[in-house]
Amino acid sequence: MTTFWIVLALVAAAWLVARLVVTLRHDGLGSAQPPTSHADWSSDLPSHPYRSA
């Protein structure tokens, strides 16, 4: 009977690992395009913002 529980635990562990792999592969992480960034603000900023006249 102990062998049955060990085999059952191994099957359950393998199923959980397989579900984890499927979930991680289908979560979209890494496959979606990143959001577009804002335009470069450096052209509108003063060259020395903290320097007094």
Image (cartoon, rainbow, N blue to C red):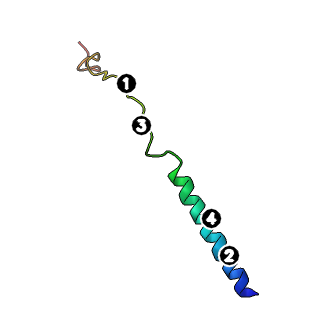
Q: Which mark is residue 38?
A: 1
In the image, which is nearer the foreground, mark 1 or mark 2?
2
C-alpha span from label 4 to label 3: 29 Å
Q: Amino acid at mark 3?
A: Gln
Q: In front here: 22 or 36?
A: 22
C-alpha span from label 3 to label 2: 40 Å
Q: Residues within 10 Å of mark 4 (few under 14, many from 20)?
A: few
Residue 19 occupies quadrant: bottom right
Q: Which residue occupies the extreme right position in the image?
A: 1
Q: Which mark is residue 9?
A: 2
Which badge, 1 or 2, is on the more N-terminal residue?
2
Residue 42 occupies quadrant: top left
Q: Position of residue 2 (x, y in %)?
A: 73, 87
C-alpha span from label 1 to label 3: 15 Å
In the image, which is nearer the foreground, mark 1 or mark 3?
3
Q: Is residue 47 left or right of residue 18?
A: left
Q: Which residue is mark 3?
A: 33
Q: Amino acid at mark 1?
A: His
Q: What secondary structure is found at the residue carrying circle 1?
A: loop
Location of residue 16 with respect to 33 vertically, above or below: below
Q: Which residue is mark 4?
A: 16
Q: What secondary structure is found at the residue carrying circle 4?
A: helix
Q: In front here: 43 or 25?
A: 25
Quadrant of the snapshot with the C terminus: top left
